[in-house]
Image (cartoon, helix red, strand yellow):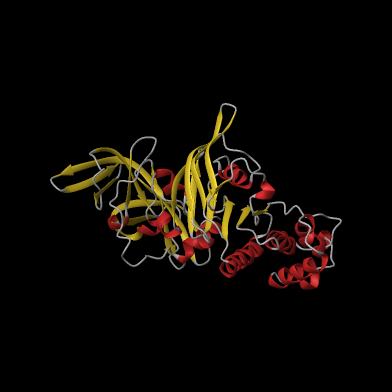
Amino acid sequence: MADVIFSKVCKDFGAFNAVKDLDLDIRQGEFVSLLGPSGCGKTTTLRMLAGLEFPTSGDIKIGDRVVNDIAPGERDIAMVFQSYALYPHMTVGQNIAYPLKKRGVPKAERAEMVAKTAEMLHLTELLSRKPKQLSGGQQQRVALGRALVRDPKVFLLDEPLSNLDAKLRSYMRAELVELHQRLGRTMVYVTHDQLEAMTMSDRIAIMEGGELQQFAPPQDVYREPANRFVAGFIGTPGMNLIDGTLSQTGSDWQFEAPGLHIPARGLGPAARPGAACLGVRPEDLHLGEGPTSGVVQLVEQTGHENIVVVRIGDDLRLTGRAPAHQLWKSGETIQCAINADMAHYFADGPTGARLNTPLDTSAPSIAVPEQNLKEIAQ
């Protein structure tokens, strides 16, 4: 096992800054996801760690060794690609054994290691088949086996589940988590899928524009988004983000926007009167009760709940959750209320930094709602 450390790492492609001053400290044995939209720099970061790209500046360490100029084959890492990259003319057994053959491992020892790996991944009955005879999930396991048989210090996984259907992705998520728990190896996982990152990771590194936005456990990312980007990116339906104004009378704060006026609670010392953004998770918008009137614009029935879009005033649209039995109709007027105790506040401007007082990390963790985890990436 090994720590993985990025220290002020930058990667430029001509005038384009793909990764900017990245500081990342991944502990040995940790499962870390690099998460963000397309073009955010997550794949470039993984490729630099793999040795497929070299940093323009800064240092990358695996264990106690700086690997900036070390060839991929000498870094003691194994990478699983999105395309699986299996050799079509080889059997499953030969694909798994190939890295060992290249390293000159004796044939008898290779066979023993392949058999052990195949048993771990439930591939024993498939060792004589070719990749074209396998399902997507089976091919995925073969690709994992080829990485696993090398017993590397660090596993790198580049969107390995993106080619699978939804049901198989769910199964393979559980398989990967179980595999990580058994091996205890450091795993760095690139994905744009929030559900994968939220349900599999010890910590999530959220990137945008080549910069690290937040690096924290899934619960903290959900409960305490570091800025407006993270708040809007994590969660489906997304957090309601409302531009308005903070004002202060004595020790009391208020937030106002067209059609909305609520007490602002839990603000930290960075809060200032003036323009700000209010963030409200859909589960914290109470529908069917409260002082504010709105008109139902849309109802999406998901089976176990309804997603309801409500228009307040002329321009403000808020999304909330409702039990499946509450079936409002488009055009119907309903009451609603924001749970002021669960509101998030962000500064005005390009950074949109969080203004709330940090939560007490010594207090019991508040679970992310199960239905939100299930639908985060849909």
User: How many numbered tags mark residues here?
Assistant: 0
Relative horizontal placement of residue 197, taking residue 296 as reference (left or right): right
Relative horizontal placement of residue 293, taking residue 56 as reference (left or right): left
Q: Residue lying farthest top? A: 15
Res 236 seen here: no
Give the image location of residue 39, x and y in percent: 57, 39
Q: In which quarter of the image is residue 106?
A: bottom right
Res 200 seen here: yes
Give the image location of residue 220, x and y in percent: 40, 57
Give the image location of residue 1, x and y in percent: 56, 60
Relative horizontal placement of residue 146, taking residue 40 as reference (left or right): right
Between 91 and 6, the one nearer to me in the picture? 6
Relative horizontal placement of residue 160, taking residue 289 as reference (left or right): right
Q: Which residue is drawn at 52% across and 41% down?
A: 59
Q: Which residue is drawn at 42% across and 60% down?
A: 219
Q: Residue lying farthest right? A: 89
- Quarter of the image for the C terminus: give it: bottom right
Q: Quadrant of residue 182?
A: bottom right
Q: Residue at x 74, y 61 (%)?
A: 139
Rendered position, 217 above or below 324: above
Q: In which quarter of the image is residue 52?
A: top right
Give the image location of residue 321, x and y in percent: 43, 60
